[in-house]
Amino acid sequence: MFGSVIIGTQQTQTVTLTNSGGSSVNISQASVSGTGFQISGITTPLTLMPSQSTAFTVTFAPQTTGNGNGTVTLTSDASNSTLSLPLSGTGVSAGTVSANPANVSFGSVTVGNKQSLSETVTNTGGTSVTISQVAVSGSGFSINGISAPLTPAAGQSAIFTVLFSPSSAGNASGSITISSNASNPTLTIPLSGTGVTPGTLGASPTTLSFGNVTIGNKQSLSETVTNTGGTDVTISQIAISGSGFSLTGNTTPVTLSAGQSVSFTVSFTPSSAGSASGSITISSNASNPTLTIPLSGTGVMPGTLGANPTSLSFGSVTVGNKQSLSETVTNTGGTSVTISQVAISGSGFSLTGITTPLTLTAGQSTTFTVSFAPSSARGASGSITLTSSASNPTLTIPLSGTGSSAVGQLAVTPISLDLGSVVVGTSGTKSGTLTAIGADVTVTGASTNNSVFSVGGVSLPVTIPAGQSVSFTVTFSPSVTGVASGTLTFTSNAQPSTTTEALTGTGTSAPTHSVNLSWNASTSSDVVGYNIYRAVYSSSSCGSYAKINSLLNTSTLYTDSNVVGGTSYCYAATAVNTSNEESGYSNILSNIQIPTP
């Protein structure tokens, strides 16, 4: 019995023949039958003496699979003249290792995640196979559930798990190598997979700034959200916060594949002036589950024109003369205003210094000149009309003036004003008077040529009726000691057009003060001197005392020169004996007032 023999190989067995009788045996023939069987090592005729033996070899070399049978036949002159030896064996194919599937493809796997697939290795041959090693190569690939050595019998399988855990995005490849004693000693199973980044949401733009938007108007901007990762992302909610902000064109839930985008519209409709902020919050199953897009904008008042002054009064202007005044128009709103036309009406009125169209940004002003040149002695009125894109599209500035046949004069009293002595760092004020003589006089300006003098007490321009007066004040604020002088000049429509007043003043140093103290000598014979103490007097009481003499005072007199004007003090003295012992405070001298400079 040869058992199972792999096709293409051979199996041998030794057969021993013995003459067990008492006489010689002549073997005349030795033959074999059956496919795949052969004998060797025996040659006939062959004589075996009593008890003699001989050996020969029987070989089985199958060429096909399946059971094989045969017979070795020995012919001799022995008592058993024909000896038959039955033969049997089975041809089997060689052990072979195969894989199912032949290659393992994981497709796309998110970086940081793990994908598992099952792999089966089967011995498809007819004999057992010993798997000596199972190795895996390739970044991110691994196996479990199989250990070598492993011996699967014919037809037996081994099932194990292959895993792919990518650590970075991109294609990955590898293989499983199975080493065995099979007919195919090395079996390679290709591995492949692609690492993809997790779904991630990105916003473009990352913030939305609406800038300045007029109250009641709406500004809209587009926002795009893109899945920049490698796996699908489902947006479950899009929410918006912040006063005045809204969004349209958003429908949830929405799923974005890798690289896909969705766009929607965000609007800002401010209801009040001022800065506003808010945000869009996008909730999803992305690696960044909450994406926030900041929102900002500023509600601004609509452009509005304002005039300063709101009306122009030229007062009395002599016929044949011209009086000019400055007018300023300002955009007091939050958006630009375009002035398309500036018109003037009224006899004798004209304007210069402005050209249309003119655009004023928020807070910007323009100044122009309005003149009145009466041609007759009578009252005149008119207006300036500004047409614009402002919330008040028509702005009217009233004009008035009177033509006068006489030319007034302006007198100032006194002609020379002495402000006297003023301590440096303080101020002194005196008054003066302006009088219109002969006709109404309009005073348009007042200035000094020395900054230590300033004029006040009168609002310009001012029209003084003929024969009447207005008062003004001059303030002297010296910064250094010594005599200061200057000139105060008034500008008007009088003849002459300027009127002056001489100004003088003297800056003086702040006076210094001291307090002289004296007291009765102590009656104790061992007193060698005195200490003097001072406290600030406030709210009808003395504060904390501090010694003010640096050396022991040996007399009963002391002068305190380190005092501050406008402050009140308390004083006390103590006696010190030869043992440096100090008495209590003397009678306290309180509320000693130092004059204010």
Image (tube, rainbow, N blue to C red):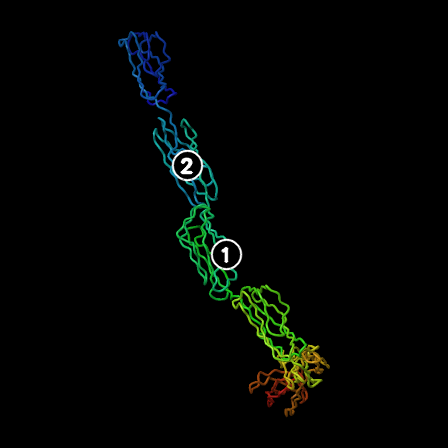
Identity of the amino acid at label 1? Answer: Thr
Q: Position of residue 247 (x, y in %)?
A: 44, 57
Residue 241 falls left or right of residue 152: right
Viewer-nearest residue: 22 or 573: 573
Spatial CA distance of label 1 from label 2 is 45 Å
Task: Tell me which label, 1 or 2, sits earlier in the chain.
Answer: 2
Identity of the amino acid at label 2? Answer: Val
**Residue 448 circle label:** none
Residue 172 falls left or right of residue 86: right
Image vertical order of residue 578 relative to residue 65, above or below: below
Viewer-nearest residue: 125 or 410: 410
Q: Is residue 542 visible?
A: yes
Q: Position of residue 182 (x, y in %)?
A: 40, 28
Q: Quadrant of residue 444?
A: bottom right
Instruction: Give the class, few, some or many, for how many residues have Cα within 10 Å of label 2's Cα (few <14, many ≥20).
Output: many
Quadrant of the rendering where the C terminus is positioned: bottom right
Q: Position of residue 84 (x, y in %)?
A: 29, 13
Instruction: Give the class, few, some or many, for how many residues have Cα within 10 Å of label 1's Cα (few <14, many ≥20).
Output: some
Q: Which residue is mark 2?
A: 104
Viewer-nearest residue: 53 or 427: 427
Element at badge 2?
A: strand
Give the farthest residue toward the left.
Answer: 79
Quadrant of the rendering where the N terminus is positioned: top left
Image vertical order of residue 351 relative to residue 153, above or below: below
Residue 282 falls left or right of residue 504: left
Asked if labels 2 and 1 touch by Cβ distance under 8 angstroms, the answer is: no
Q: Quadrant of residue 555?
A: bottom right
> Disc 1 or disc 2, which is closer to the eye?
1
Q: Quadrant of residue 544?
A: bottom right
Q: Which residue is mark 1?
A: 207
Residue 89 falls left or right of residue 569: left
